[in-house]
Amino acid sequence: LKLDVEFVEYKFGCDIAESLSSGVVDFALLSTPCFAGTSSDNLDIVAIAAIFQVEPAVFIVMDGSGIETVKDFVGKSIIVKNPYWERIIDRVLQAADISPDRVVKDRGAVDIKRFLLGEVDIWTGYAQNEPVEVDLSGYASKTIYAFDYGLNDYEGIIFTRSDIISERPDIVTAFLSASLRGWNIVVTNPELGLDAVDTFTTGLSIPFQRRSIRELIPYISTGIAPTGWIDSERWRTSCARWGIKNPDKYYTDSFLRRVYTERYLEIGNVLVDK
């Protein structure tokens, strides 16, 4: 099956889940916290794979700031980019037994130059993005990882609609197979991934893209499960943590199992190399 795919660039403020549910797009990437922030009961969307197996959300602080752990966030300013990031921040603070009102939430411009200039104490971002940008800008920083505070949900979750699943499962299988094949190529040969990214992006330097791709690989390929895998129990636990009801309604692993049938054997609920 040959797919004719159009990539739609995200625009700030766009409701991705609603765009998918209403048919504006047929596939979309969401995170668990982002999905939790939607009116999921009214959305006709289903998760079919999760690219990030490890939570990539991080907090960046400058060396010499005196901030070593989340406990040190008290009284410091932290950038709040949008409601998604506020949910992440509050969850991590609560895990460290810190009330969210004990930090100074900065809702100003999200230009990272503000952090480089010292206007904000703590910057939020992803492990493969902002820390690389800060380092390449010539600044020494420290990265504090959200997963060290119990936040380890799936990210980069591929969603589609249930009507596409029921009416055109061949398209879902083909799209997922192509996506996973591409990610596996990136994991094993990052330079090929660099070529692909450079085709679809503008304004990002080659040194940044090269570092970014290499940084994200450990978050995608853990050696525990195939690329994109969604474990049912982990999915349910994450949904419960974020208040998502009826988690099984919004997830299926049938397409993952279909794609990986030829390469893996299933033992219990785990896929292992043949």
Image (cartoon, rainbow, N blue to C red):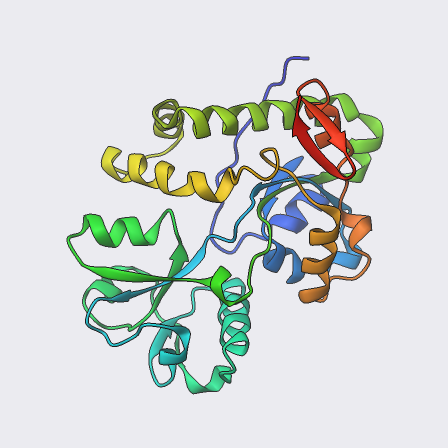
Q: Residue furthest right?
A: 166
Q: Kindly indicate the quadrant of the structure image that contains residue 72.
A: bottom left
How far across and how far down the image is residue 191, in percent?
A: 34, 25
Tell me the quadrant of the picture where the C terminus can be found: top right
How far across and how far down the image is residue 23, in percent?
A: 70, 39
Q: Residue furthest left?
A: 138
Q: Is residue 25 visible?
A: no
Task: In the rendered view, tell whether residue 136 sits above or below residue 140.
Answer: above
Task: In the rendered view, tell whether residue 85 sits above or below residue 8.
Answer: below
Residue drawn at the location 23% of the way across and 36% of the way down: 207
Is 15 displayed left or right of 116 in the figure? right
Tell me the quadrant of the picture where the N terminus can be found: top right
Q: Is residue 45 visible?
A: yes
How far across and how far down the image is residue 260, in percent?
A: 68, 25
The foreground one among 49 and 14 is 49
Is 44 displayed left or right of 215 in the figure? right
The foreground one among 215 and 156 is 215
Residue drawn at the location 55% of the way across and 68% of the way down: 87
Residue drawn at the location 56% of the way across and 23% of the way down: 181
The foreground one among 27 and 158 is 158
Is 27 displayed left or right of 200 in the figure? right
Task: In the rendered view, tell whether residue 231 sits above or below residue 260.
Answer: below
